[in-house]
Amino acid sequence: MDDLNSAFNSTLYQAQIPLLDAIDKVRGHRASFYDDIQFPQWVVVGDQNTGKSSVMEAICRVHFPIHDGLCTRYPIQLELRNSKEKAVLASIIPGLSRTAHEKSKLQAFQKKLLDISELQDVVREAGLVMGISTTVTSTAGRTNERQFSDDLLRIFVSGPEIPSLAMLDLPGLYQTQSKDQDASGKTMVTNLVKKYMQQKNSIILLVVSARNDFENHVGPSFLPKEAQKRTLAVLTRPDDAADPDRPLQIVKGLVDDQSLTWHCLRNLSSAERKQGKSLNERDRLEEEFFDQPHWQSIPSHQKGIGALQKKLSYMLHSAIERELPRVMSELNKLINVTNDRRRRLGEPRATSQEQIEYLSDMAHKFEKCVTAATAGEYDRFPELFGDLDTSSHQSSFQNCKLRANMRELNRVFRVVMDVVGKTMVIHETLPAAVISTPQVAPEDIPSVEQENIAPFQRHPHWAGLAETLSQGKSFLKVD
């Protein structure tokens, strides 16, 4: 415990607190751009029943309801801060699969706890709000109930014995399916784990149990090759291994073929937990275990919770410093986009009077636009009708020029009626009277110059007519 206290009071811990606080403030407002910005954080992954929650408990110095499995049914974002003041806050960030109505309901979940012991009840309540059954054996899979969820429970914890860290605890991977954990649940958990493993800002804490053969674990097989350098593997339950030498071989890197960095923890057993042993007692039992002669071959920085605390803090601090310029750049881009959207919304319209004035101005402007369109006064609104001095601009705004379009339609109608407005034509000058059906093709419609109307283009009523006439042939259909 002395190692933990010295770690919390170190210069590194104190230096990273402002960085983590700044990230927390951004995370608190990130519901609308949840996947746009990826912050450096520890992501805890591993198979079910590997002691993952016990590792989290030892690191965070917070008891979780690990006995009922709820803690691994959805992601839990832990924002831990070493501070003289104690505080526990909880909220839910909806997953991408939620509807707008569901998101509103989940975002309403906001809890401020008086004591950290209430956290277990909050975890259970959050599961109910997400639609996850209260147990893992009875009602999972029924209508409106989920086995797993991609919703995220965000928990902020501060206190004198709390480390300054940012961690994400993911549901445990599993292979064997049951009525409580079917194929759809397996797919959701797998996709969640792969998603966060592939994020370049995720520092992966891979938990492996010494009680099971290393080859039987699913977690290591999901680890991308490029993520190995940002992965710290933690071996749990070395006291429960069938071969006492096997945990030492794993920690020394003699078993895995991925060249991972290993650390070993000895957590409370089920019997010790039932006896109600505290976290301080857990630390004492761990120290006694690693003091055994055959563990002396493992360096002190690779075993025990105190050394792990320092390692986690250092790696997170380094990642934040390395990625901070990129995060700031992405934030500035989002700020610019948001400011641009706000500018396009115009002045604030908070009161009823401001809203009435805004609608009145809009109606007045619409009336003036309609008047200009019917009168051919297109230069009054170049943003609507285009620049009259540039024909390339006019073509893209041509549909808005009501008067010019109506004149062209009338002209085309006149030309067509002059030519084909009769059922037949009798050619009396030919030797024998010939009766023919009149035909007209689009190219038969006179051009602007042929109509001798070019001099009138400068008149406001004829503005834009030259360009409109060039499109007039499209109104004629020849059978």
Image: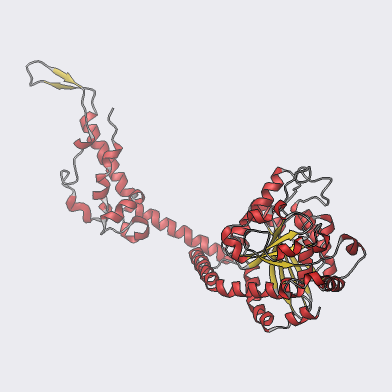
Q: Residue at x 91, y 66 (%)?
A: 276
Residue closer to the observer: 133 or 354: 133
Residue closer to the observer: 330 or 217: 217
Q: Residue at x 59, y 62 (%)?
A: 227
The reply, left or right, for residue 117 in relation to residue 377 is right
Quadrant, the C terminus: top left
* Residue that protrudes farthest toward the right in the picture: 275
Residue closer to the observer: 383 or 121: 121
The reply, left or right, for residue 284 in relation to residue 455 is right
Q: Position of residue 367 (x, y in %)?
A: 42, 56
* Residue that protrudes farthest toward the top in the picture: 432
Q: In which quadrant of the rendered view does residue 154 lie? A: bottom right
Quadrant, the N terminus: bottom right
| Up/down of 386 relative to 287, above or below | above
Res. 2 in view:
yes
Q: Position of residue 89 (x, y in %)?
A: 75, 69
Number of callouts in the render? 0
The reply, left or right, for residue 364 in relation to residue 305 is left
Res. 381 in view:
no
Q: In which quadrant of the rendered view does residue 126 lie? A: bottom right
Q: Residue at x 32, y 50 (%)?
A: 398
Residue closer to the observer: 91 or 77: 77
Q: Position of residue 41 (x, y in %)?
A: 64, 67
Q: In which quadrant of the rendered view does residue 273 lie? A: bottom right
Q: Position of residue 131 (x, y in %)?
A: 76, 51
- Colour scheme of the rendered structure: secondary structure
